[in-house]
């Protein structure tokens, strides 16, 4: 009439393999580094002293140079702009370009 299903041992093996692969995936995710979005004022002051030598300052330049996320780099530049250390040269929805006040 019909065919009997797979033996229970084969089903158990498949479940064990699936669980092991799930553990491996979780371990891979744990290995990735997560950058902190919290900004230390020591970092802001360090960037403040070093941006005097840069002609044009964008969030990408800051993110690459100091290994920050883009949102953290934008926040740092916004803080420096509010303090009066930077001047907003041009901006769009996606990008803000700053110049240093001491470079004027």
Image: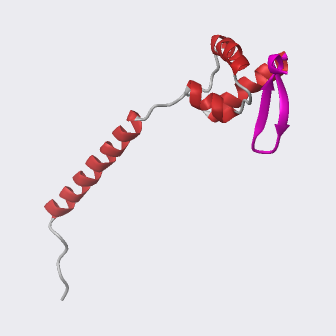
Residue 36 shows in the view: no
- The residue that appears at 84% across and 30% down in the rendered structure is 88
Indicate left or right for 34 with 85 as reference: left
Residue 13 or residue 100, whichever sits in front? 100
Residue 8 percent across, percent down from the top left: 16, 63
Question: What residue do we see at 36% from left, 40% from top?
Answer: 28
Relative to 102, residue 95 above or below: below
94 part of magenta stretch: yes
Tell me the quadrant of the picture where the N terminus can be found: bottom left
Q: In the picture, residue 103 is in which quadrant?
A: top right
Q: Residue at x 68, y 16 (%)?
A: 44
* Residue 67 seen anywhere in this rendered image of the structure: yes
Direction from residue 16 to residue 60 in the image, left or right: right
Picture coordinates of residue 24 (x, y %)?
Answer: 30, 44
Q: Which residues are magenta?
A: 84-104
Residue nearest the observer in this picture, 76 or 89? 89
Q: Position of residue 12 (x, y in %)?
A: 20, 57
Please report the residue visible at 64 percent of the width from the left and 10 percent of the height from the top.
42
64 versus 29 height, above or below = above
């Amino acid at each position: 009439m019909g065919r009997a299903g797979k033996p229970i041992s084969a089903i158990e093996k498949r479940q064990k393999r699936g669980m092991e692969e799930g553990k491996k995936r979780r371990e891979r995710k744990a290995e990735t580094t997560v950058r902190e979005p919290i900004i230390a004022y020591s970092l802001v002051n360090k960037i403040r002293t070093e941006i005097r030598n840069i002609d044009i300052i964008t969030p990408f330049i800051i993110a690459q140079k100091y290994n920050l996320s883009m949102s953290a780099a934008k926040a740092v530049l916004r803080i420096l702009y509010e303090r009066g250390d930077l001047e907003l040269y041009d901006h769009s929805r996606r990008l803000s370009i700053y110049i240093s006040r001491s470079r004027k």
